[in-house]
Amino acid sequence: MGINNSQVCIFATEMTATVSGAVIPVATAAGIAGLAQNPVMLIFDNQGTVPIAIYVNGTAAENLWRTFPGGEALVLDMRGNSGIAPNFTPATGTTFFANGASGTFSISYTYAQKQ
């Protein structure tokens, strides 16, 4: 199987949320929530000092994905799937919500685009 060199890495607009005790969407500065593209790599970053809970596609208890301790960042690299599922990625439109006492949470991501 050959290597696909027909795509380049594009950096998506950062999504952020400043939390203060209520669940709010993690969105771009323009207020757009959700993934505009299928990400190849995501960076989740709790830039504050207190825990922030992240929900995916809704705010019900079953949508809680992970609680990030203060100052923690996580890189989710979707390229490491050994070719078993080359398109393994969160869907376009996936939304994230944040809840914490205070602080800022950001999500940055890259995606592939044909040259």
Image (tube, rainbow, N blue to C red):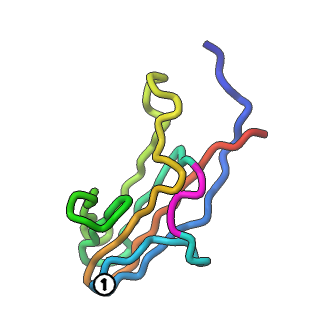
Question: Relative to 8, is 93 above or below?
Answer: below
Residue 88 at x, y percent in the picture: 47, 35
70 up-or-down from 115: above or below: below
Instruction: Give the residues drawn in magenta, as a range.
Output: 33-37
Q: Residue furthest right?
A: 115
- In percent of width and height, residue 63 lies at 28, 59
Return the x and y of residue 69 as percentages of the image width and height: 24, 67
Q: Nearer the viewer, residue 7 or 58?
A: 58
- The quarter of the rendered structure image containing the N terminus is top right
Where is residue 30 shown, x and y percent of the image?
Answer: 61, 77
Q: Secondary structure at mark 1?
A: loop
Q: Nearer the viewer, residue 85 or 95?
A: 95
Q: The disc labelled 1 sits on which kind of residue?
A: Ser
Can you identify the residue that label 1 sits on? 102
Residue drawn 70% across the image and 41% down it:
8
Position of residue 89 in the picture relative to residue 52 (left or right)? right
Pick the quarter of the image with the C terminus.
Answer: top right
Residue in the picture at 66% in, 46% down = 9
**Residue 36 included in the magenta stretch of the image:** yes
